[in-house]
Amino acid sequence: MLAAAIGWTDALVVAGGVAWKPTGSWTADDGIRPIAGGSYELKWGLKEGTLLIRGSNANPVWPALHGVSCG
C-alpha cells in the first residue's frame, strides 16, 4: 500500500514584521515545501504582485498562480 501526504500552506502579507492577512493558499502533494525549496517566483507591481509556485508532475502544487495584494 502506498500512502501520500498532502499538505497545505497560506501566503500572508507581512508589513513591518506583522502578518496582516492571508492572501492565498495552496495544496502540495507528498508534503513538499516549494517555498523552502526555492520553487517559486514572486513579481511585484506598484500595488500588487503575482506568486507562481512550481511543483512537478510527481509532486504537483495547486493552484500554482496567486494574486498578492497589500491593500
Image (cartoon, rainbow, N blue to C red):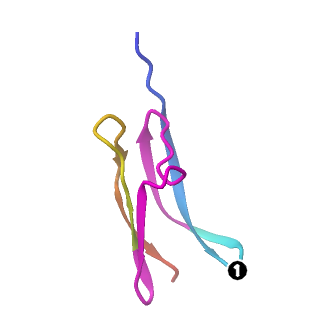
* Point 71% across, 74% down: residue: 17
Give how far across and how far down residue 48 sits, in percent: 43, 81
Horizontally, residue 25 falls left or right of residue 12, namely left
Numbered range of the magenta stretch? 22-49
* Point 36% across, 52% down: residue: 54
Give how far across and how far down residue 23 sits, in percent: 49, 67
Give 64 or 71, whichever is nearer the viewer. 64
Image position of 31 with respect to 13: above or below: above
Residue under numbered circle 1: 16
Task: Locate the N terminus by quadrant.
Answer: top left
Q: Is residue 38 magenta?
A: yes
* Point 70% across, 73% down: residue: 18
Quarter residue 52 falls in: bottom left
Give how far across and how far down residue 37 sits, in percent: 50, 49
Q: Residue furthest front?
A: 38
Image position of 5 with respect to 53: above or below: above
Give how far across and how far down residue 55 sits, in percent: 36, 46
Give 8 or 46, whichever is nearer the viewer. 46
The secondary structure type at the circle numbered 1 is loop
Q: Amino acid at mark 1?
A: Gly
Horizontally, residue 47 falls left or right of residue 56, namely right
Q: Residue furthest top?
A: 1
